């Protein structure tokens, strides 16, 4: 199917309170421009190098999100233009984002990536680490970052019940923290499970292959 068909079908199924992040990793410039011309503005990449190659040759109105693990020594390269860093998984990283953002007097939006999957290969904060970081942020430790919510990646499994349990876990934590912090984004769900994620309370879904086709 064409990107246009994929996009229109997907947009039709998304409730109005759910934001779509188009995951363009590994895909070339042309299909990204095609999607942009259909009206999509939020695109997400998981690698800094690829983001640095694409960003200068694509429209400046694109809101770029980083969704992959970020090394502290690369933060300075993306801070001038990134809209949101969804994959904050350590205090060291949050500290570096704050430091680089302060240098250019720009406030950076971030999400805290919480570990919800069973596999221990996935990056992410434990619940207690998430709460500790938020307490520090609230007491003024990172004035150049705006923590807008949480992000999570479910286990890579065909077991929908397990995936659902992981999404519900994150939604519960999100609701709990939202009582104390100005949260507005719960990022969960990809091509294979975004409908389930939305049922479980996602406000942002990260969809790649269902839009652009498989990455092979
Ligand atoms: C690649 C990726 C996605 C999108 O995956 P698809 O299955 O292609 O939709 C979503 N989130 C993260 C963190 C990713 O790395």
Image (cartoon, grey):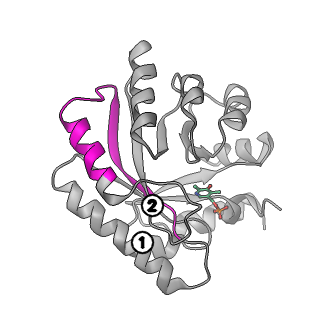
Q: Which mark is residue 205?
A: none
**Magenta segment range?**
129-154
Q: Magenta span has 168?
A: no
Q: Position of residue 46 (x, y in %)?
A: 63, 46
Q: Relative to residue 96, is residue 6 drawn left or right?
A: right
Q: Residues within 10 Å of mark 1 (few under 14, many from 20)?
A: many
Up-down: is 3 above or below 24? below
Q: Position of residue 44 (x, y in %)?
A: 59, 46
Can residue 184 be seen at all in this image of the molecule?
no
Instruction: In this rendered view, identify the residue nearer to me: 14 or 180.
Output: 180
Q: Magenta span has 134?
A: yes
Report the Cα–Cα distance between label 2 and label 1: 11 Å
Q: Relative to residue 175, is residue 111 drawn left or right?
A: right
Which of the 4 image quarters holds residue 104?
top left
The residue under the point 53% across, 84% down is 160
Can residue 71 be seen at all in this image of the molecule?
yes
Instruction: In this rendered view, identify the residue nearer to me: 94 or 41.
Output: 94
Q: Position of residue 40 (x, y in %)?
A: 58, 47
The residue under the point 36% across, 74% down is 168
Q: Position of residue 41 (x, y in %)?
A: 56, 42
Residue underneath mark 1: 167
Disc 1 CB within 8 Å of nearest ligand 1 atom: no
Which of the 4 image quarters holds residue 214?
bottom right
Q: Nearer the viewer, mark 2 or mark 1?
A: 2
Which image quadrant shows ligand 1? bottom right
Q: Which mark is residue 115?
A: 2
Up-down: is 104 above or below 37? above
Between discs 2 and 1, the one toward the N terminus: 2
Quarter of the image with the N terminus is: bottom right
At mark 2, the secondary structure is loop
Q: Relative to residue 185, is residue 41 drawn left or right?
A: right
């Amino acid at each position: 199917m064409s990107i246009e068909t994929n996009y229109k079908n997907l947009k039709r199924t998304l409730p109005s309170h759910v934001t779509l992040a188009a995951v363009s990793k590994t895909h070339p410039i042309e299909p990204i421009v095609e999607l942009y011309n259909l009206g999509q503005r939020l695109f997400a990449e998981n690698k800094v190098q690829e983001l640095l190659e694409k960003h200068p040759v694509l429209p400046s109105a694109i809101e770029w999100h980083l969704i992959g693990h970020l090394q502290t020594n690369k933060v300075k390269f993306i801070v001038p233009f990134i809209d949101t860093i969804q994959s904050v998984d350590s205090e060291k990283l949050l500290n570096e984002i704050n430091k680089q953002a302060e240098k250019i007097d720009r406030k950076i939006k971030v999400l805290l990536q919480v570990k919800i999957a069973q596999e221990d290969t996935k990056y992410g904060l434990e619940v207690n680490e998430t709460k500790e970081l938020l307490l520090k942020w609230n007491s003024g430790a990172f004035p150049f970052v705006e923590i807008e919510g949480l992000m999570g990646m479910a286990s890579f499994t065909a077991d929908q019940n397990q995936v659902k349990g992981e999404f519900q876990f994150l939604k519960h934590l999100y609701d709990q923290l939202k009582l104390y912090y100005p949260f507005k984004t719960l990022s969960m769900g990809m091509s294979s499970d975004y409908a389930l994620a939305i049922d479980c309370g996602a406000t942002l879904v990260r969809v790649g292959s269902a839009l652009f086709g498989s990455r092979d």
